Amino acid sequence: MSILVTGGTGYIGSHTVCELIQNGYEVVVIDNFSNSKRQVLTSIYEITGVKPTFYEGDVADITLLEEIFTKEKIDAVIHFAGFKAVGESVKEPLKYYQNNLESTLHLLAVMQKYHCQKFIFSSSATVYGDPASLPITEDFPLSTTNPYGTTKLMIEQILKDLYQVDPTMNITILRYFNPIGSEKSGRLGEDPNGIPNNLMPYIVRVATGKLPQLNVFGNDYDTKDGTGVRDYIHVVDLAKGHVKALDKLDAGLHIYNLGTGTGYSVLDIVKTFERVNYVSIPYQIVARRPGDIAACYADVTKAKKELGWQAELSIEDMCLDAYHYIEQANKRAD
């Protein structure tokens, strides 16, 4: 079974590619390296012993997509490609709407043309907006507080509309909470280009002296210590969730939360990282970031029941593995 993975050299995409290969799937990757590095392909090979078929380019490029679907026998698509920074999306909404929507629409159009009906979409807990209660189940009302989340919600609606006119489609929407950590060997991890937008890569760069301190966006939320609370999930657990979803992919439209079901504050993560890695993370409290909410964590009962999946790795594992990756990356660079 041949799986096209868009954004397959990105953080979550690359970990999922490894899990797919290790579970016997043939993988074809498309990526333009806008927020990843070519070295990731070598790392995938070092981990799995397999070089996935790779196409460099943009998912919005219909000509390239048609080349892939013509040359490769694509049975299913896992769609990761897209811009993903909440703060940036608030500052540059048109960039996010154009990129995330255009690429998805072109991909779905080419899939239809080549009669590929199996699709897994990388969505986000941001589609729940500022939830009225916690934990969040899949049937909660949907709304958004930032353009990034709105692109995810709009794509979900596109997929629901598509399924209405073609109920033979096999569509699974996976709503991620907050992935952190890295693959155990330290060959793959989260190392975005430029200044990180997400918490863990920022902490790691402070730990290694590449950034002077961590900015904590707000300490006046209605949480135990005033900082934002999120459901952090190990990226390897998240990747395994995609394999489980692919294994079960059948006719219908299915939606699952992928998280741990536990909320940790920003300061919980900072303190755990310091404790398990024996480092100090200086931080300062700054103003809240536009588009952020106080707390968000999942009810994962449905994924456990229907997919036979649940997160297994701890917050300590996440902090240890994230730091191990950057230490190994620094050694390779020396």
Image: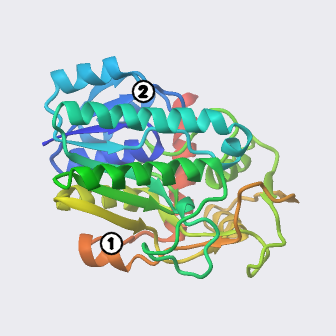
Image mark for residue 211: none
Figure disc tally: 2
- Nearer the observer, 214 or 316: 214
Q: Which quadrant would residue 291 be assigned to in this image?
A: bottom right
Residue 2, how many percent across, how many down?
16, 38
User: In screen coordinates, is 294 left or right of 66?
Assistant: right
Residue on which the image places disc 1 = 303
Q: Crowdedness of circle 1 by 10 Å Cα count: few (<14), some, many (20+)?
A: many
Depth check, front residue: 96 or 187: 96
* Quadrant (top left, top right, bottom left, bottom right) of the N terminus: top left
Image quarter hosting the C terminus = top right
- 63 sits to left or right of 96: left
The residue lying furthest to the front in this view is 165
Label 2 crowd bin: few (<14), some (14–19), many (20+), radius 10 Å: some
- Residue at x 49% of width, y 50% of height: 154
- Please determine whether, in this image, residue 245 is positioned above or below residue 103: below
For badge 1, the amino acid type reads: Ala
What is the x, y in percent for residue 320? 54, 60
Quick check: 305 above or below 146? below
Residue nearest the viewer, comparing 269 with 35 = 35
What secondary structure is marked by label 2?
loop
* Mark positioned earlier in the residue sequence (2 or 1): 2
Q: Which residue shows up at 57% across the image and 51% down it?
A: 150
Between label 2 and label 1, give the one nearer the viewer.
Answer: 2
Q: Position of residue 129 (x, y in %)?
A: 61, 65
Residue of label 2: 60
Q: Look at the image and tell me whether residue 329 can be seen.
A: yes
Give, as a three-letter code, the residue at label 2: Ala
Task: Tell me which residue sits at (48%, 71%) in the image.
Answer: 314
User: Residue 116: image x %, image y %?
Assistant: 18, 39
